Amino acid sequence: MLAPLPTRAAAGGAWIGDEQAPTLRHGGRDYHRTLTPPDGLPQGRVSTVSWRYELLPLNTALQAALCHRRHCVPLAAARGQTTGFAGLPVAGAWTFHFGMPGEGQRLAPRLRGGPLQLIVNYTTS
């Protein structure tokens, strides 16, 4: 009888970034926040990414996206998870982009930025 060959499981981990979301004061502008992984992060590939942000008062016209290495994923909600970055290198900056329609028009009320969090899960081999 043959014994099964041992398999090598992929190791992994996660890093968490916390920041304050920007306050949006005008339409038609790109407001952004960039989070970078901690120093000494092992080389790995992204598996899933979770996020949450707070911009109050809630506004259905808000446009939000998360970008990493020239790849952007629209964020349809203030919190969620995506596999849209799966396979990309975990190293490098991650940038949240926020905007409202309008060409420089002052927002009334402005959207006050609150907590912003990013959780990047990755695998190493």
Image (cartoon, helix red, strand yellow):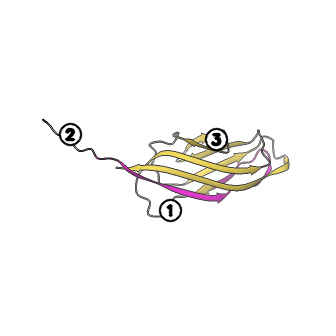
Tag 3 near tag 1, CB within 8 Å: no
Residue located 67% across and 45% down the image: 78
The answer to if 98 sits in the magenta stretch is: no
Tag 2 near tag 1, CB within 8 Å: no
Instruction: Give the image location of residue 59, x and y in percent.
Output: 78, 42
Report which residue position mark 2 lands on.
4
Q: How far separated are the C-alphas under marks 3 and 1? A: 24 Å
Q: Which residues are magenta?
A: 8-33
What amino acid is labelled 3 in the image? Answer: Leu
Is residue 22 among the parts visible in the rendering? no
Report which residue position mark 3 lands on.
75
Residue furthest out toward the top? 1
Residue located 35% across and 48% down the image: 10
Q: How far separated are the C-alphas under marks 2 and 1? A: 39 Å
The answer to if 13 sits in the magenta stretch is: yes
How dense is the environment of label 1, judged by Cα within 10 Å: few (below 14), some, or many (20 and up)? few
Instruction: Please indicate whether residue 7 sits to the left or right of residue 83 in the image.
Output: left
Query: Helix or strand or loop: what does disc 3 sit on?
Result: loop
Foreground tag (2 vs 1):
2
